Image (cartoon, rainbow, N blue to C red):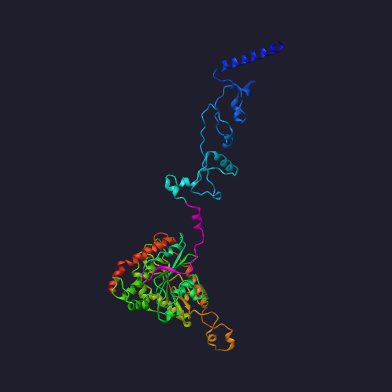
Amino acid sequence: MSESGHSQPGLYGQGRRRRRRRERDPAGPPGQNLSGPSRDRDYVPRERRDGSEESTGPLLQKTPIILAKPPGERSKASAPASGPPSLEKPIMLIKTRDEGGKPGNPPDIPPSASGAGTAKMEREGQRPTQPVYQIQNRGMGSAASGGAVDPVIGQTKLLPPEKMKHSIKLVDDQMNWCDSAMEYLRDQTDMLVVGVIGLQGTGKSTIMSLLSANSPEEDQRAYVFRAQTQEIKERAGNQSSGIDFYITQERVIFLDTQPVLSPSILDHLINNDRKLPPEYNLPHTYVEMQSLQITAFLFTVCHVVIVIQDWFTDINLYRFLQTAEMLKPSTPSASHDSTGSSGPDDGSEYYPHIVFLQNKARREEFCPRNLKKMHMAVDKLMAHSHLKYKGTLSMLDCNIFPGLSRDYMETEVNLFLLPLMENDGEDALTRAGSGPPLFSLLPGYRGHPNFSSLVSKFRSQILAMSRSQLSHTILTEKNWFHYAARIWDGVKKSSALSEYSRLLS
């Protein structure tokens, strides 16, 4: 009786307080007033937000609205039975390259696994952002996803290029273009193209081998450009035919050519009854037009053209060079460098640097007085040429003549002298077996530095030539190959060369 007496006033007072709250706020459901002793017992949503267990009381439940919650805790929380299922927006994750993912193809991650990936990236201090490739390829459709770059292909572009062991054909003996050089070329623009022309037997292939990959001490049978054998020399034949191609690891392209105005090629055409093309009537006309086509081609696609001669000098060679310059295809150039030029049209048409190499020079040709006369003769013969024949190469800068000043050469042209190649340290008297024993221990007097030293200085000056633009756009190595193929096709179909051939016959 006493227990019921004490409990009845408590229940009565509690009900009266609830009625007063309903009268003061009739729209508020029970449990919304945070004051009073029943706050912790009636406010179920707050306990769910803290992650505690759900109460089992008979109170009315409302669907909680979760504004933000980590995905890991979201999967642990139990969804209410009466409310609609919550929609989760999937997060696309991109694996890094170390995890095996490709930059262009992000893996498909299910929504269930996205929480763990996001948590891992947050622990590592990273944020899942929009991939860059989606921004760049936006609006391109399926073509963008199909053009993704494979990282393996990207790594191969950074590998060192394949080293050539020997030269290959760029133009064969039938004057047809060859595509075998394409595999050795790269997509980079820092290159130098060096070509060579000369009469038969002047040493073109030997000089180009020494400039590119070989040394004078090596066996000539291992040269990248095959030199004349003793058998070919005895029957006065030519070793090279067409145009040979070689590129070094320093990205220097060397083009070795068949001899111009070659008597052995003419003899081969006459004696073997070789059928001429229909546009040529006489064999000597065909040989001269072949030489003009090759020289005009080099004047268009090369930065440097070396003219090799083994005696000074043949006036017909300079006439041939001027004819090839006249028949050269017109090539607009964006470069306005007029260094070494002597004509007003240099800004609108490209002309290469031309270097005259006196091979197998004798001792008296290294005399400063004779050297000055040689420079004056070349300058007068090339006075009306647009080719850059002066100002880019100097023997005085090589310390070959230490007593001479630059004022001694009034008109210094691009002329270099190389002596006859021989084994260094062997004097003529020693090879003959004569002379006193004292002189056999001393180096013989030559009047000039040895052959190896001069070749090294000549190579340094050739590789230091300026690399001006060959066309109106900057060419990569592969673009140069396609550009050279178009030039060669244009030279063979040139109307100016055809008209000149008609005048010769």
Camera-side residue of 80 and 473? 80
x and y percentages locating residue 404 in the rendered image: 50, 77
Above or below residue 244? Residue 44 is above
In the image: residue 459, left or right of residue 291: right
- Relative height, residue 435 to residue 121 (above, below): below
Residue 211 location (% of width, % of height): 48, 71
Look at the image and give the residue range highlighted in magenta: 149-175
- Name the residue: 66% across, 14% down: 10
Classify residue 9 as left or right of residue 352.
Answer: right
Residue 82: image x %, image y %? 53, 26
- Front residue of this view, candidates 73 and 121: 73
Q: Is residue 397 visible?
A: no
At 57% from the left edge and 85% from the top edge, which residue is drawn? 440
Q: Quadrant of residue 264?
A: bottom left
Q: Nearer the viewer, residue 118 or 323?
A: 118
Looking at the figure, which quarter contains the C terminus?
bottom left
Q: Is residue 500 above or below residue 445?
A: above
* Residue at the spot 33% in from the left edge and 67% down from the top edge: 492
Task: In the displayed orientation, state which residue is furthest to the right.
Answer: 2
- Give the image quarter of residue 114: top right
Predominant secondary structure in magenta? Answer: loop
Confirm whether residue 63 shows in the render: yes
Residue 73 in the image: x percent, y percent?
Answer: 59, 35
Report the label total: 0
Which quarter of the image is occupied by the N terminus? Answer: top right
Q: Is residue 329 left or right of residue 52?
A: left
Q: Is residue 272 magenta?
A: no
